Amino acid sequence: MIKEHYLQNATHYASPHYDARPEAETISLLVIHCISLPEGQYGTPYVKDLFLGTLDTSAGSGFEALDGLRVSAHLVIRRDGQIEQYVPFDQRAWHAGQSCYGGRQRCNDYSIGIELEGTDKQPYTAAQYQQLITVTQLLMAQYPALTHDRIVGHQHIAPDRKTDPGEGFDWAYYLTQLQTNNK
């Protein structure tokens, strides 16, 4: 259930990396990403730290390249299916960067970003797909401009920069399950 732009079964954290959507902007795009820090390591606190602006990027941390990076997503779905929310859905999370969909730039203005804990080469878990399907259905019910044909990967809106969620994401399965479970 979504109440006041928060997913009720998520653990909520307040990222400082967001701002208001442009006035009268309609949420009309869902962007699926993947993230792990360090890459391929799961269950670490580092994704949370990155989105909260508390990641140690000092010399020797292994995260020096992320110094000064201010990013967030609306949701993160962990490998075990646990969901974390960092930005309320009605606000603009900073997840897409330079991006374009259907001729429109600045996808952050009108999209919701969901990060799956993973890499773009490894398969995602059954728990992640189940949660993603459930969350997508809730979002589509809450924000009617979000439709099946307006669900994309980061790779689709920033193809020269991004590859996520990548070859490890089973689009056919996800979209089929979404259609099947939505009847």
Image (cartoon, rainbow, N blue to C red):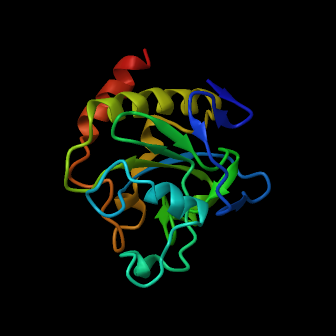
* Whole-percent x, y for residue 166 in the image: 26, 55
* Whole-percent x, y for residue 152 in the image: 41, 49
The residue at 45%/54% (across/down) is 45
Q: Quadrant of the C terminus?
A: top left
Could you tell me if residue 95 is visible in this image? no
Note whether 99 is above or below 180 in the view shown.
below
Residue with the most extreme bottom position: 59
Residue with the most extreme right position: 23
Note whether 130 is above or below 172 in the view shown.
above
Could you tell me if residue 8 is visible in this image? yes
Pick whichever, 41 or 138, lies toward us: 41
Q: How many marks?
A: 0
The residue at 70%/52% (across/down) is 91
The residue at 20%/50% (across/down) is 122
Pick whichever, 104 or 81, lies toward us: 81
The residue at 60%/60% (across/down) is 52
* Whole-percent x, y for residue 18 in the image: 67, 61
Residue with the most extreme top position: 183
Note whether 165 is above or below 69 in the view shown.
above
Quarter of the image for residue 89 reads top right
Q: Is residue 142 left or right of residue 60?
A: right
Quarter of the image for residue 12 reads top right
* Whole-percent x, y for residue 128 in the image: 35, 35
Q: Quadrant of the N terminus?
A: top right
Q: Is residue 114 left or right of residue 175?
A: right
